[in-house]
Image (cartoon, grey):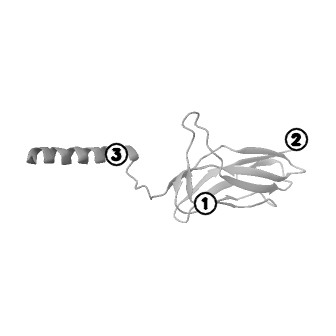
Amino acid sequence: MRTSNRAAKLAIGATAGLVLALAGSTPASASSWELRDLEQRMCVTSDFGHPNTYFVAAVVGKWSKTVHVGLRNLPPGTTSTDDAIPPGSNYPNPENGATTINGWLQISIAPLPVGVYTPTLVAYSGKETQSVPITITSQTRC
């Protein structure tokens, strides 16, 4: 009786260990998110800019606190709005890898001298900050 009881406990322990290994070492309640680099680019005409367009953010994984997203280091005269992504999760589609966009950043790009500008899209949760570059190219004609 004692041997079968010990074998059952070992089997349960091994099964629990396998489940934890497959689930990852992070507890289920922990936040683990990533700001995906969508390699966003935009061309604007130097004499007009682009008044009222959007850049987007894709935060994937799981998070327990609001993740704020915004644009930083914008070209002169350009304005934008930040967005807040409430606690939750977002995972790529296992069939095709598609990722749901969950952050929308309205931006009004002022007329700019011809050149390439590289603002930063930033996501922050209070504890963690991640960023990716975006590219705005100002030309006489796009």
Residue denoted by label 2: 141
Q: How many marks?
A: 3
Residue occupying the point 84% across, 56% down: 110
Upstream in the sequence, badge 2 or badge 3? Answer: 3
User: Cα distance, mark 2 to mark 1?
Assistant: 39 Å
Residue denoted by label 1: 86
Residue occupying the point 59% across, 47% down: 36
Quadrant of the image containing the C terminus: top right
User: Cα distance, mark 3 to mark 1?
Assistant: 29 Å
Q: Position of residue 70 (x, y in %)?
A: 68, 59
Image vertical order of residue 126 relative to residue 48, above or below: below
Mark 2 neighbour class, 10 Å CA radius: few under 14, some 14 to 19, many 20 or more: few
Residue denoted by label 3: 19
Residue occupying the point 10% across, 45% down: 3
Q: Is residue 7 left or right of residue 137?
A: left
Upstream in the sequence, badge 3 or badge 1? Answer: 3
Image vertical order of residue 64 relative to residue 35, above or below: below
Q: Kindly identify the amino acid type of the residue bearing the numbered disc 2.
A: Arg
Task: Looking at the picture, tell me which residue is in the foreground, 37 or 119.
Answer: 37
